[in-house]
Image (spheres, helix red, strand yellow):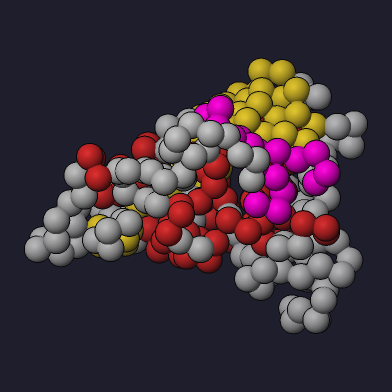
Amino acid sequence: MAEKKGTAVALSEESTGVPYGELIRDYEPPEGSSWRFGRPDYASVNKLYFQHRTMAHQEGSLEALVQKLVKNWQVESLHISDVHKWKTMDTAKFKLAVNGGCPCNAQFLSDVGHYSLLVGETVDFSASSVSHDGSRKIFGDAFPEGFAWEILEVYSGPPNVLFKWRHFGKYSGTYVDKAGNKHKGSGEMLNVVGMCLAKVNERLAIETLDVYYNPEDMTRPLTSTLADASQRPLPVEEADPKVGVGGCKADGKCTLM
């Protein structure tokens, strides 16, 4: 379906999960909004999700509710660039922090993107040296079938929702590290597990997200095989972050982003 100027077309049924008998995301773009990269297509990542998920939550359960809430947030914060159109969050209050780092606001999330914000500075990836589109391409090229996400457990309900999550995908593409070295995946499944504490209001709009996990679990497995044997692996000691995860400066000073 063609997208009219200034109007984001609704997600396809394939993107919502309906062909698999489950509605796992039901995000409806606000009137007057537009997709950042064109209408997102979740068909491939949904196939990966349903084939390799470890939990099948009962419809109407707290786990299913929270999972859909987060998936809708992912759609909006990644694919709708205008934060004034965001509705899955209370943008006036929204803050996101990673591993206890300095919090960022909605605009910073929109400008920087998920990967740069959540991965930050590691041995093999530098958020400060890539754009929103650049980080999306780096990880999209590494996981051509998509990088799926699921809720494992929910420990408390609204307004303070504590849950355990899993990100997973087949590393069948090519990953380019921050030194420019290319690494070729062999199709193995990468699993990243973490925790999150989300505060929501009475409308279930997200006010804060505190994410906890090890970013090295995301990047180190991607650099096990160099595509070009003449290239040199990046030593651990060369990870000299200018900016820490969540926006914290290397000097320890905390600045709201």
Residue 58, position as x, y percentages in the image: 70, 31
Residue 102 in the magenta stretch? The answer is yes
Q: Nearer the viewer, residue 123 or 254?
A: 254
Q: Which residues are magenta?
A: 91-108
Among the 4 quarters of the image, the one containing residue 37: bottom right
21 to the left or right of 190: right
Q: Nearer the viewer, residue 59 or 144?
A: 144
Q: Main secondary structure of the magenta part?
A: loop
The C terminus - image quarter: top right
The N terminus - image quarter: bottom right
Residue shown at the point (57%, 34%) measured from the top left: 254
Residue 111, position as x, y percentages in the image: 63, 59
The answer to whether residue 47 of the structure is visible from this angle is no
Give the residue furthest to the top: 155
Among the 4 quarters of the image, the one containing residue 80: bottom right
71 to the left or right of 145: right
Q: Nearer the viewer, residue 156 or 133?
A: 133
Residue 208, position as x, y percentages in the image: 72, 34
Residue shown at the point (67%, 68%) measured from the top left: 36
Residue 211 in the magenta stretch? The answer is no
The answer to whether residue 83 of the structure is visible from this angle is yes
Among the 4 quarters of the image, the one containing residue 95: top right
Residue shown at the point (37%, 51%) measured from the top left: 125
101 to the left or right of 127: right
Give the residue furthest to the left: 230
Residue 114, position as x, y percentages in the image: 57, 50
